[in-house]
Image: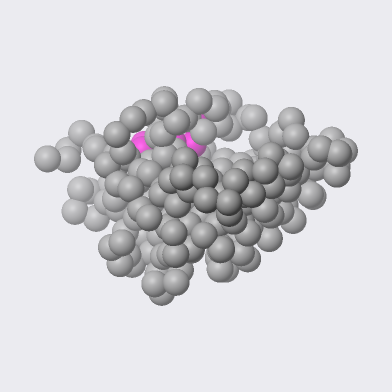
Amino acid sequence: MKTERHVLVIFPHPDDEAFGVSGTISAHIANGTPVTYACLTLGEMGRNIGNPPIATRESLPDVRKKELEEAAEAMGLTDLRMMGYRDKTIEFLAPGVLKGMVEELVAELNPTLVISFYPEHSVHPDHNATAEAVVEALADMPKETRPTFYALAITLDNPDVVYSVKDYMKEKLQALQAHHSQFGATFAEREKHYRDGDPEIAESLENERFFKYKFADDT
């Protein structure tokens, strides 16, 4: 894994980081790289409230905030930004709002690597809107100072980068467990199979996949 000056992670929902990048985040932190996670919403419109329920619709934002804080602690992350946008409204924000937010974060942190979703290949409207804002903000930067953009894609195959995070599975499993309202018993069963040596589950959890986004001026 390349040493970075600073890594900026941007996702719309608590738990977006857990399956796809929690091992990578933990690895960068262990290597001494500063990592900032900007989480746009508290996932207050999420359909899951636990099984059996551990929240009501009214209390879910507080539950998910606490889960996000616990996941950050599990990863060793100390710079967690909760940006205060509302779940399932990201795609409807006025043009330029999200782009401006990304620009401000990049100007403040000067990252060499940004991680988010891949535009049009991330299924959820909030995912795609976040990805588009990241691309718009980075595309306006001079090529010489633009950070690398690693994107998670749900509907693309053949990633450009595959990180083994086997050495950080303790942190990753704890981060996943922290989001109990969303994963709950489903993850408990998956974790059991992993600890029992299921090779398919081990491969999916121990490797994190990224697509290196190519901008128009990239050669």
Quarter of the image for the C terminus: give it: top left
Image x and y of residue 136, in percent: 36, 36
135 magenta-colored = yes
Left or right of 39, for residue 67: right
Count of picture labels: 0
Q: Majority secondary structure of the magenta segment? A: helix
- What residue is at 44 percent from the left and 72 percent from the top? 30
Q: Nearer the viewer, residue 136 or 156?
A: 156
Image x and y of residue 56, in percent: 87, 38
Quarter of the image for the N terminus: give it: bottom left
Q: Nearer the viewer, residue 138 or 178?
A: 178
Image x and y of residue 34, in percent: 44, 68
Which contiguous range is marked in magenta?
129-136
Q: Is residue 158 above or below residue 149?
A: above
Name the colour scheme: one colour
- What residue is at 63 percent from the left and 66 percent from the top? 73
Residue 75 shows in this picture: yes
Image x and y of residue 211, in percent: 32, 40
- What residue is at 54 percent from the left and 26 percent from the top? 125
- What residue is at 73 percent from the left and 44 percent from the top? 184
Residue 36 shows in this picture: no
Residue sticking out furthest to the left: 219
Q: Nearer the viewer, residue 94 or 211?
A: 211
77 magenta-colored = no
